[in-house]
Amino acid sequence: MAVLTVRDLSKTFNVGTPRASRVLDNISFEVQGQTFVSIVGPSGCGKSTLLNIISGVEEHTSGDISLKSDQGGDARMGYVFQDPRLLPWRSVMKNMMYVQDELNEETTARARRYLDMVGLAKNADFFPGQLSGGMQQRVGIARAFAVEPDLLLMDEPFSHLDAITARGLRAQLQDIWAQSKKTVVFVTHDVVEAVELSDRIIVLQPGGRIYEDITIDLPRPRRQSDPTVATLQAEVLARLEKMKAATQVAAPVA
Amino acid sequence: MSTVIENRRRSTTEIAESTPEWKRRLTSDTAARLTAGISFFLFWLVVAAVFTRVPGPVEVVQRLGDEFARGEVFGNFGVTLYRFGVGVALATVFGIVIGVMMGLSKLSRAFFESPVLVGLSIPAIIWSFLTVMWFGFGDTSPIVTTFLTAVPFVIINVAQGVRGVSRDLRDMSSTYQVPLLRRMRDLVLPAVTGYVAAGIRFAVIIGWNGVLLAEWFGGSGGVGYRARFWYDANRYGGFAAWVVLFVGFIVILDRLVLDRAISRAFRWRDNSA
Ligand SMILES: Nc1ncnc2c1ncn2[C@@H]1O[C@H](COP(=O)(O)OP(=O)(O)OP(=O)(O)O)[C@@H](O)[C@H]1O
Ligand SMILES: [Mg+2]
């Protein structure tokens, strides 16, 4: 598990040039322990940018961010990117092993297990170019699980998959999260998915501010068919509609 | 009942079945290569027939036969090949090391950029004069000339390849804290394989100028030395025989070895297993 603290975080791309654009604006939140947080918001509101800053591949312009393992020391991270990001010249299995910190029988077995979980055990020796887009995305998911991270970042991991595969993987994700001690930050634009999975939903509005920070207090495992889940989903959706109306007045489309 | 479909496109099977065998052969890549070879050969025949000072193919083959009979071929060819091989190997190793450095660090790019550009613009003939002055006769000057002529081409190719390594994949590697050595082996090197191969190919094709010129001026045996021997004796057939021999060797090396190695390195690009 990880302790993630974000305080007054802002991000401006191309600082000091005419093309400067503020993407994240004074974001603050804290996540720790076995928490599942979703970040939802319309396309372009800065969700991927926020994950990139948390992961360290993007620098922030101002504010504070800190990340550590709850055991002390650096947090081990797994990141399911919005695109698969596999090495095209290495087989699926070699891609899985590329990110392991140690190469031994245990990690190999673990990589196989997670590959099996996403239904790709038979494709271990394929090159990524020989897989469909959704299959590649599933390798990316298996890769992130297989490092058994303290902090798992996921950027719309299921959005390119068919409904049934996605539902299966969502169930797997809930199981894994419940069993292994992980902090998850999950980006999605699918409110239904967010309510099903999360303890907490952070809603970003266009311009990159936090519009709302909603706690989802429902027992697990949650079922789509459960009426209380459905009710809450409808409620959160209604709040998002309200936000959309409000921000459209505040920031009219030029 | 048959319906007419407008703008119907034909399937690959249908196209293959409806094209006659002879037509498929005539429009193949092999046919194009053969045509190029035959045209060149005919052109040579015509030029040799018109200009008496240009030796024709028959004469060249005869002279080559004479050289074999004199026992000059294997010794000289072997010497040249050794020098050429060492020069190209050195150029490849140094080219990859400096190229990777230039691709990864801005500082070394700033440092090496101008020397490499200068190196690119210096022709093999200048290097051969200089190295014969510096090292005298022997193996050193042809080796160093080959190296100096070829290495800038390897460097710029590799540097370009390294700079082109996908930012997304580098970001992925750093979030997973992949160790540097593994990143080199599994990310950087495969990404630059094509550029390294192109660089080595350039080294081979450019480098042979260097080795022949240095031997021409160095006078310590080898293909270039022998070609000059016949040239100085006003016997253009013998001169041409040696040039044809070496160029032929380079072309075959490129086709049989380099070309195949390159397509092996790019196996992952094939869509079928
Ligand atoms: N490298 C960059 N340079 C300049 N602007 C960028 C850069 N990366 C992202 N942006 C801008 O930042 C904004 C947010 O992008 P981001 O990818 O974080 O959106 P998102 O919320 O993930 O959207 P989506 O749901 O469509 O994936 C966009 O307006 C985008 O144009
Ligand atoms: Mg995004």
Image (cartoon, coloured by chain):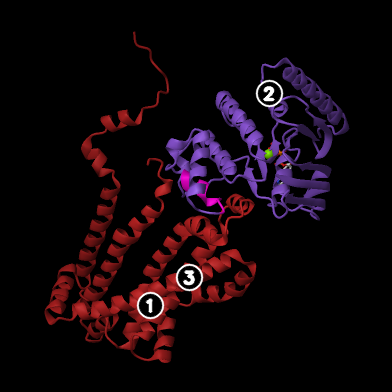
Amino acid type indicated by mark 3: Gly
B155 relative to A117, above or below: below
- Toward the viewer: A52 or B11? A52
Alpha-carbon neighbours of circle 3 within 10 Å: few (<14), some, or many (≥20)? Answer: many
Mark 2 vs 1: CB contact within 8 A:
no
Residue ID for mark 2: A222
Circle 1 — which element? helix
Amino acid type indicated by mark 1: Gly
Please tell me in which quadrant of the rendered image residue B142 appears.
bottom left
- Toward the viewer: B138 or A238? A238
Q: Mark 2 lies on which chain?
A: A
Alpha-carbon neighbours of circle 2 within 10 Å: few (<14), some, or many (≥20)? Answer: some
Residue ID for mark 3: B95
Please tell me in which quadrant of the rendered image residue A124 appears.
top left
Q: Which chain carries label 1?
A: B
Q: Which chain carries label 3?
A: B
- Residue range corresponding to the magenta coloring: A92-101
Q: Which of marks 2 and 1 is in front?
A: 2
Q: Do labels 2 and 1 share a chain?
A: no
Chain B palette colour: red
Residue ID for mark 1: B210
Q: In this rendering, does residue B150 appear at all?
A: no
* Cα–Cα gap, marks 1 and 3: 17 Å
B226 relative to A105, above or below: below
Circle 2 — which element? loop
Amino acid type indicated by mark 2: Arg
A184 relative to B222, above or below: above
* Point 21% across, 39% down: residue: B22
Coordinates of residue A228 in the picture (x, y in percent):
75, 17
Can you tell which chain is drawn purple?
Answer: A
- Toward the viewer: A127 or B91? A127
| The N terminus of chain B - image quarter | top left
